[in-house]
Structure formats: structure tokens, C-alpha cells
Image (cartoon, helix red, strand yellow):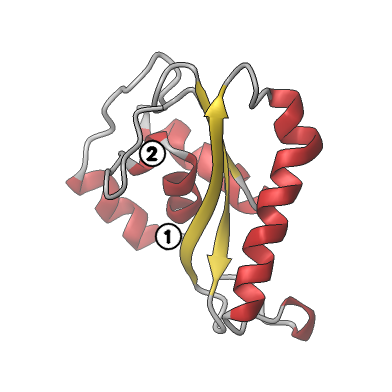
Amino acid sequence: MASRVGSRNPMHSCAVGKVMLSNFSKEEMDEFLTERNLPQRTPNTITDPVRLKEHLQVVKSQGYAIDDEENERGIRCVAAPVFNEKGVVLAAISISGPAFRVTKKAIQDILKKEVMKAASDISQRLGFKEETGCEPR
């Protein structure tokens, strides 16, 4: 992986970015798409705004995002949102690795649950209370 502390990736091509984008309001999303282009990082990168919006609806409803070699060839990633006490997404955490290890099956069977559990634990420590009816926004 070509990852360094402080490095940045386009939001639309990485799992952490897609989790964050999936929680944008309609106005924030429209502004994002107006101000930014959607560069193609790999053949799998979603570059069509309509398709991206549809994909982000799925991300939000399932509670996690997958970067299926969309940012870097040979690398897969799964990410989940971290909520504050008001149910606002303020961060995301992820697991990344080589696609031969981070397989689609491993994501579905193990990794998505692990990353969602870790994100939930962090969210609860920040005051987010799912069981009291505080719904994510």
C-alpha cells in the first residue's frame, strides 16, 4: 500500500471517504460534486455523480463502505463511521490490505463486523447511545 501518515485520498475512491460522504446532507453533497471532480484512480473508481450518489445510499443503509480496489490496484478496504454524542459522523475507521488477503468473502464474513464493532465502541466512548434512540444523522 502506498500509505503514509498525513497522506490524502479522494473521498469518492476510498472507504473512509465514502463513509463520510454517505452522511453528507443533500446540500453538502451537491456542493461537494460542484466543487470537486471525481478523478479515476483505478478502473474500479466510481466517477459518475449519479452512480456515486446511488452507491452512497447503499453505504449509509448498510453502515459500512468498501473500497474494492477503487483507490489503488490490489488494495481493498472496509470502513465504518464514528458518531459523536449527537449522532453526527465525525470520523471513520478502516481496515485495509492486499486484495488477496482482504477478499470480498473475508470482508463479508469477518472484517465488516470487526470494523463496525470497533467504530461502535469508539462512538459509545464519545457519548453516542444507539439504545436510547439517538439515531445517526
Image check: 52 left or right of 130?
A: left
How far across and down, in percent of the image, does residue 110 sit? 78, 39
Nearer-the-camera pick, 61 or 64 = 64
Name the outermost residue toward the front. 5
Residue that mark 2 sits on: 12
118 shown above or below 52? below
For mark 1, give the secondary structure: loop
Q: Residue at x 65, y 22 (%)?
A: 101
Tell me the kind of residue under disc 1.
Phe
Quadrant for residue 10, please give it.
top left
Q: Answer with left or right where residue 16 lies relative to residue 40.
A: right
Is residue 2 shown above or below 43?
below
In the depicted structure, whether residue 108 falls above or below residue 30: above
Local secondary structure at mark 2: helix
Q: Which residue is drawn at the image coordinates 31% and 52% (left, top)?
A: 30
Circle 1 Cα neighbour tier, 10 Å, few/some/many (<14 / 14–19 / ≥20): some
The answer to which of 60 and 66 lies nearer the viewer is 66
Residue under pointer 1: 24
**Percent position (x, y) of residue 74?**
49, 17
